[in-house]
Amino acid sequence: MIRFLTAGESHGKAVTVIAEGFPSNLPIKKSYIDFHLKRRQQGYGRGGRMKIESDAAEILSGIRNGKTLGSPISMLIKNKDWVNWKEIMDAEKIPGDTVKINIPRPGHADLVGISKYDFDDIRNSIERSSARETAARVAAGTIARKYLEEFGINVGSYVESIGDIFPKTNFTESLLLNNIRKDFNAWHLSKRSDQSDVRVLDDEHQKKIINKIKTAKKRGDTLGGSFIVVASGVPVGLGTFMHYDRRLDAGIASAIMSINAVKGVEIGQGFQNANAFGSQVHDEIIKSGHGFTRKTNRAGGIEGGISTGLPIIVRAAMKPIATLMSPIESVNLSTMRKVDARRERSDFVAVPACAVIAESMLAWVIAEHFSEKFGGDSIRETKDNYNNYTRKLFSRMKKNFKK
Ligand code: EPS
């Protein structure tokens, strides 16, 4: 089993992560991790913070001479902004006054955080609830991504809408209707969307979205949106219907929903399918070479909590950023009077970054199920197990059903 644990506050010294359970001899380079960390920082509509940070992973353990050792991999990503917060974030109480935050922002973790943890300063809620933590998740997710790539599994994403602006051509539909090439590689989606400032697949769409973001900025407002994250090359048989919490779709939904500001997750054509006839929903089975495929992929690559072998397709909805420059109503907790919610530096839109984070979370969950199924202390052992399973899959089935 693989697992990870992150630590770190948004304006503390650093965010860190320990990822463990990966087999030995998995090739991985720091530049590869940094590449994906950088992708998370992009996107038109982000605030001043991203101009300060240039995320890079300092590898503290678990990797030697470009390969995993099988030991826990620990990584540290510095918060460059920390120098501006040294006193506020100091672990010791520094003599003098600390300005305490007493006006919660609706939609942020401010009010629930102080209620739950008995804080006398909203800053204590802000720091750990911040999406800064997702840098550490991407570092861990990138190890998972590399592990999956060894087996031809790739992950990619694109933004589908921001501020209710959708593209003219519905590319997602063609994915769901399985109108894709057999050798489809989900990373190519990201290769394309990474060219766009808002991670969409066509220029016209980008133009309209950027205009909408400009309008939001002018109004002191923020926007959310939806994005698609896809994994290709996933073999049939990851996940299980044997236990509720080991279903692949349940794990994916939980992991994607855990990303800050994500409020909806859909696998395949989940919501649309709910309103159609069964005959218009289920993916017909057809024989293909030494195995099977489906005419469509409306199930998004998962049936019965188990991967079908078709691309895993996830749609997620991100709510608009909670910090508004033209604030809505809140309460001053010191006076208990009605006031405008507090303004502070923040992003206007973070949907493009959110999609990159979702790639890491999807890679992580698939890697979890993959390592559970194929195990192995070294990558060679995992490959032997994987090849043994996949090569004999169809012949085993034929034998079982022979008349
Ligand atoms: C965030 C607020 C902003 C974002 C931050 C998440 O930071 P700051 O308050 O320092 O301006 O930029 O995101 C990141 C730092 C990051 O690395 O993604 C929040 O309140 O969640």
Image (tube, rainbow, N blue to C red):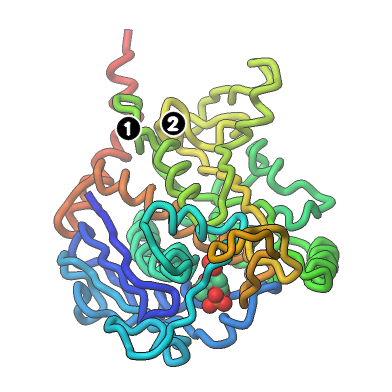
- Residue placed at 38% from the left, 80% from the top? 12
Please state the horizontal and vertical placement of residue 358, each as a whole percent of the image. 51, 56
**Disc 2 crowd, CA 10 A, few/some/many (<14, 14-19, 20+):** few
Give the structural element (helix, strand or loop) at label 2.
loop
Judged left or right of residue 252, residue 343 is right
Of callouts 2 and 1, the N-terminal one: 2
> Which residue bears the numbered disc 2?
291
- Residue placed at 35% from the left, 26% from the top? 241
Instruction: Give the answer, above or below, for where 195 lies relative to 54.
Output: above
Q: Ligand 1 is found in which quarter of the picture?
A: bottom right
Image quadrant assignment for residue 281 = top right
Residue 135 visible from this viewpoint: yes
Where does the C terminus fall, quadrant-wise?
top left
Instruction: Give the answer, above or below, for where 148 lies relative to 61.
Output: above
Q: Which residue lies furthest to the top in this view?
A: 403
Residue 188 visible from this viewpoint: no
Badge number at residue 393: 1
Of the pair 180 and 32, the residue shown nearer to us: 32
Judged left or right of residue 375, residue 37 is right
Of the pair 322 and 41, the residue shown nearer to us: 322
Circles 2, 1 touching at the beta carbon (< 8 Å): yes
Please state the horizontal and vertical placement of residue 160, each as a whole percent of the image. 70, 53
Check disc 2 and give the amino acid type: Gly
Image quadrant assignment for residue 299 = top right
